[in-house]
Amino acid sequence: MVASQLPDAVQGPGPVDVVLNVNGATHVVRLEPRVSLLDCLRDHMNLTGAKKGCNQGACGACTVWVDKRRVVACLTLAIACEGREITTIEGMAENGTLHPMQKAFLSEDAFQCGYCTPGQIMSAVALLAEGHAGSDAEIGEWMSGNICRCAAYPNIRTAIRDVRDGVGGVGRATR
Amino acid sequence: MTTAIGRPLDRVDGHAKVTGAGRYSAEIALPGLAHAVLVTSRIPSGRVELIDTYDAERAEGVLAVLHHLNLPKGGSVPPLLPSLFGAAASGQTFFPMQDEVIHYAGQHLAMVVAETLDQAEHAARLVRITYQETASITTVEQGRDRAYEAEKIFAGFIPGRIARGDVAAALDRAPVTVENSYYCAANHHNPIECSATTAVWEGDRLTLYDATQGPNATLHTVAELLNVMPSHIRVVTNYVGGSFGCKAMIWDHPALAALAARAVHRPVRLALSREQMFSSVGHREEQEQRLTLGADRDGRLTAIRHHKLSPTSHFDDWAEPSLGVASQIYACPNYEGVYNLIKANTMTPTFTRCPGEASGMFVMETAMDELAEKLDLDPLELRLRNYAETEPMTGHPWSSKGLRDCYRRGAELARWSERDPRPGTRRDGNWLLGWGMASSGYPVTPPGNPQRARARIFADGSAVVQSSFSDIGTGAATAMTQVAADGLGVPLERMRIQYGDSDLPNTAAAVGSAGAGMVSAAVHIAATALRDQLIAQAVADEHSPLHGADPRQVVVSDGRMALRDRPATGETYAELLQRAFMADAEALGTWNPPGMDTPYGTMTFGAQFAQVAVDPDLGLCRVRQLIGVFDPGRVLNRKTAHSQLMGGMLWGMSHALLEGTIMGPDGRWANASLGEYLVPVNADAPDVLIETIETTDTVVNPLGVKGVGEVGMVGTAAAIANAVWHATGRRHHKLPITIESLL
Amino acid sequence: MRPVSYSRVSDVATAIATVAADPTSAYLAGGTTKIDMLRIYAEPSQRLVDINSLPIDHIEVQPDGAVRIGGLARMNDVALAPVVVDRFPMLSEALLLGASAQLRNMASMGGNMLQRVRCSYFRDAEASCNKRAPGTGCSALAGVNRGHAVLGTSPHCIATHPSDAAVALVALDAMIHVQNSGGHHAIAIDDFFLLPGDTPEREHPLNHGDLITAIEVPALPAARNSLYLKVRDRESYEFALASAACALTVTDGVVAEVRLALGGVATKPWRARRAEQVLRGAPATRETFARAAAAEMADAVPQPMNAFKIELAQRTMIRALETLTARGEAP
């Protein structure tokens, strides 16, 4: 057998110090390895923008980015994110200025209760970067991992189109 | 003067929502917060023989394991009363963990409290319960032969049988009849935010952060359940992640959270899991309806017989009022409606968006389409021939009715006149295309108690209006800001609304599409009272340019009072207050709603048109367009109102094609997850075209607001089912319409 | 979730040695199945060995035209790789029609092969289930079984295999490359997925510690004219009620080459060999397609709620074949 490296030290099952980079800042959080990235953000870091809707990857309310890719935080262990770059809705506005997608969601009324909204926005911004916003059908398909029970879907598509086409902030007000 | 009302203002809570800064009820950070997790019954009927908490109590981090043997008993369970009455509003007259009896699967049997959520969830798995199971009934099919005619349903407000004229004779004479049985699967609300309560005791005072449609409903219900003085409870509801009825009544978890917090002497958060949302907060009951229409050869209805059969709980006679709007939408001299119930091992069903109107109007509007087909009449023409000029059950005039305009405008938008009436004649590749339509109606119901708001203006001219209502995503906070700004006559940017707190002036729960109407009444009255008070002060103030003026001739705009015909004469509120060394001024507004017995029919109406594509080989049905035109009275905010109507219509689409909770033979809901209880995803949702026809209504409330929260869903399922018929030639009497029924 | 311990490994040999040495351990890749299973107590691991840093996530074209997909390549990356899109459209489509964009960013190809069934009784840790707790019985037989299988079932288990990608890979005769402490071996995908029979708990021939390092898709020119057709209630983000992966070459109106596999209706990704046999050399007509589809479903065993799947699967096959025939005829 090929000589193998030793595995990293076994951590847990009790609490261990986990070093996480969230929205550009480094945090040390004391966590059991079983804690999901979602519960870590919400309960241990007081970042409640990522929402819990199903805790089983069936709603997308917990969508965040890990290394700039959108993932569901409920099926991600926080400890597995050490050394990775985590971005949440709290990291989207810069110096208090909303991201164009946040502005577009506001002006197009792309939400009602607002609970799925952070996940929708994290998906929507990623969607544009991925290049999957070519048509309404493509936007619809690639946004289908984020359930909006208020069913603001048509307005979500409009908001994404606005940002894609650089016409953010127009809104339905003018119609 | 109206400048803000009606404008498509962005949501005032929008910034908090798009940045993730808004705190929902399970997101309140508190020092020492502990987490509670519920343990639920696996069986639908029987008793707990043994509850073994040994391992759970010794698990890491566990602070308490509470169940029927050690949970402190409190007060009494209040009666089931819709939260629109503004009093205690128990979702069912049963409180768990008081004895060992099990009435339904998912019943709360124990509660584990631990330091962290993971610890509490794990320990909950370690609670071992031994059951003694007894026979159960959980479905219409199982309980059919035990059905009984209800004396009353809906908390006693609706009689189990309503009759008018002579239906049997009219049906005998009717040259044309349509008779069918219909079935609607059970539904669960599934807002994306699961219900949650965070409870904090400070001495004998209790604060609850609760996801509720009515902070006061939570307050009164918990007060009675725990036998705590209402004056000692405060309920805070800053943000609610959707409700759709499951947070309209108050279930046991807020009180359980409070009991857990008392037991461990720490703040406790109790958040239901998604699976628990299927057996903790009610549901829309499974139901069978049988409808017989009799008509003359011109299509005029002569008789309606409408019977419903559905399961309810052991404790309460509940059925959603499916016969209501269906009995009011068309003129017809003879009518008979009956609610039959089955006592079953389920929770008490509850309000689910469009409670009754959606299911009943699916039935009525599908039958009307079949009647049109039989008579070889255009479906829209048939509806016009049966247009109810007065409220059919009472003969009262309508407070307002724009349905004829809705039909006309909707038909125009849908190019209805170009529709070939023959089914199965249009194709797009593998897809058969069809258009269908239906009428919408949703009652306007006044709250049961006075609604209040307080308006306060500061010496710099900025103002705040306070009222206790919660905004569950309707846009109420935004609309109320507009109402308040107009009422007081200040610009929007100087007006703030404060809401979602039972310490603020009392309102009933925002349910039944009544929120905008009733809260706007209180806010309008408070704001105009403050305006009038300040005008009175100005005309009485000899230093004011308005001194001695007739107050009725003073108008306010942009925070400045001026004479109507000489706008140059006037002063700002700020000038008036500062001169008088007043830091602020305030006024309380109270709206005493009309009784339920006003001599008017009150309803929001609409017309819906749907285009569907059906792939008959693969059994697929996709909705390509929805068009809805509604008459909601005054629209407070065009943007948020349209969003609500759109959401309602997409709920109707979902009701038609996707949603159904399936009761397993083990008496448990078999698809209790968002993976298996299907709600639409983005790709399912077509573009929705909404228009509103503003009608003036001087009866329902001061601003003439009839409501938009639910009417959007009424009739959508029928419009879609009728479009499926138009596409394929096949009728569907069962919801949801699934692949197997389309093959 | 039960308490778990965690370690991260960065080379394959260490990963295998670590997991092989501890029977309570398991690999953690994308986590979309593993974390879900742990949270619902449907799987007993106490130690997770994070393999996400292993260098087995590449997609490589072999000299013979085969494509080798690393076990840790993510679903979205495979689906969008130009070589997969060009040469194996059915695989690209099957991947993109699965799960959601977020889950596809996470889920690995190896994990996709090992994903667990969606049967609600399997997922309910306290229900009787022969797959999760051998010998306790199958609750689905008398339960809610609309989504369950009609092909390859046994009296012990009727759970549908959930993967879409595996259906395409079965049609493509992929090889599953496995490494363990004894070395490396490859398993033909047909031998990889096991029927439930008397041992529904055994879903594949892997032993504890075996690691899927790669999936090799052999060159198949006919696969350029291929598709994955998925039928489900919802337009997206749902498992299949019936699906077909199909590649077809029609020469002079006769089926020259065909690959056909079914998803959503069987206890494993189902290669439709009977249908292929009927099709090969037969005229490419709707009549042939119907006959082939009927032959494939001849032995199907329906449950009370899912008899419609027998018809639906046939129509899905026919539609897939007709679509590819039309495409092949297009100039």
Image (spheres, coloured by chain):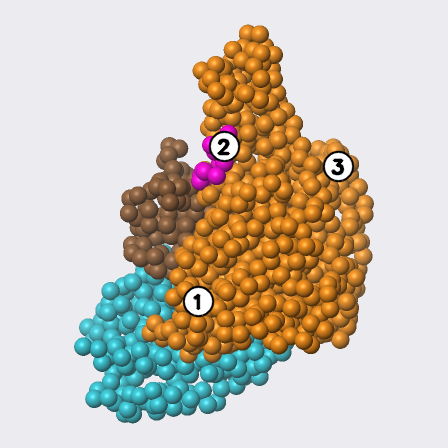
- The tag earlier along the polypeptide, 3 or 1, is 3
Residue wearing tag 2: B2
Where B504 falls versus C190 (above or below)? above
Residue B375 lies, with reference to residue B445, above or below; the image says: below
Q: How dense is the environment of label 1, judged by Cα within 10 Å: few (below 14), some, or many (20 and up)?
A: many
| Colour displayed for chain A in the image of the structure | brown
* Drawn side of residue B430 relative to residue B153, left or right: left
Residue A137 horizontal side relative to residue C329, left or right: right
Residue labelled with disc 1? B435
Q: Is residue A108 left or right of residue C149?
A: left
Q: CA distance from mark 2 to mark 3?
A: 38 Å
In three-dimensional space, the C-alpha distance between marks 3 and 1, rounded to whole angstroms, equals 54 Å
What is the crowding at mark 3: few (fewer than 14 residues within 10 Å), some, or many (at least 20)? some
**Residue A46 % position (x, y):** 51, 39
Q: Amino acid at mark 2?
A: Thr
Residue occupied by mark 3: B230
